[in-house]
Amino acid sequence: MIRKLLLMISAVVLVFSMLPVSDAYAGPEVKCKACHKFTEKNNVGPGLKGVFGRKAGTQPGFKYKFTKYIKGDAWTWNEENLRAWIDNSKKAVKKLTGNKKAKTKMQPQHVTGADADAVIAFLKSLK
């Protein structure tokens, strides 16, 4: 009886572990929250309040020591740039700065499609 129950529980766990999980709002609330705050306060990454439309590398008080390639750059955080960044920041930093050697400490998040739309809408709302 116990063996049967354990097999059944294992089967349920296996089935649920194989289901796709959407990151739509898990993105900002889980992934971003690990390094960013949704206020002006900085954390490991710069605060995200007001990020949409902000010139890259200009978050007050944030030390861009790991992302020196971004500091004071001429591009802004618009939809296109945010979409590229939240998909693959390692590729995006090279494209957005025009510097093939540019680097960032932020790991690629691979947030795309409807999930990216949701994250960008969330970032736009942080005014």
Image (cartoon, rainbow, N blue to C red):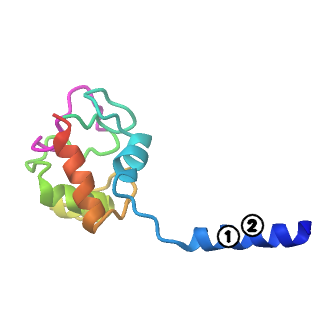
- When the figure is inspected, residue 44 is found, relative to residue 88, above or below; the finding is above
Across and down, in percent, residue 6 comes to: 82, 67
Is residue 101 visible in the rendered structure shown here?
no
Across and down, in percent, residue 54 comes to: 12, 40
Q: Which amino acid does label 2 sit on?
A: Ile
| Residue bearing mark 2 | 9
Q: Quarter of the image holding residue 65?
A: top left
| Residue bearing mark 1 | 12
Q: Which residue is drawn at 41% across and 49% down?
A: 31
The residue nearer to you, when weighing 66 against 121, is 121
Does the CB distance between marks 2 and 1 fall below 8 Å? yes
Q: Residue at x 29, y 45 (%)?
A: 67
Q: Give the range drawn in magenta.
A: 50-64
Q: In this view, does 62 lie to the left or right of 76?
A: right
Q: What residue type is labelled 1?
A: Val
The residue nearer to you, when weighing 42 against 11, is 11
Name the dominant secondary structure of the magenta segment: loop
Q: Is mark 2 on a helix, strand or loop?
A: helix
The residue nearer to you, when weighing 74 against 53, is 53
Q: How far apart are marks 2 and 1 (CA)?
A: 5 Å
- When the figure is inspected, residue 76 is found, relative to residue 43, above or below; the finding is below
Q: Residue at x 32, y 61 (%)?
A: 90
Q: Which residue is drawn at 86% across and 72% down?
A: 4
Residue 58 on the magenta segment: yes
User: Which disc number belongs to residue 88?
Assistant: none
- Label 2 Cα crowd, 10 Å radius (few <14 / some 14-19 / many 20+): few
The residue nearer to you, when weighing 50 against 72, is 50
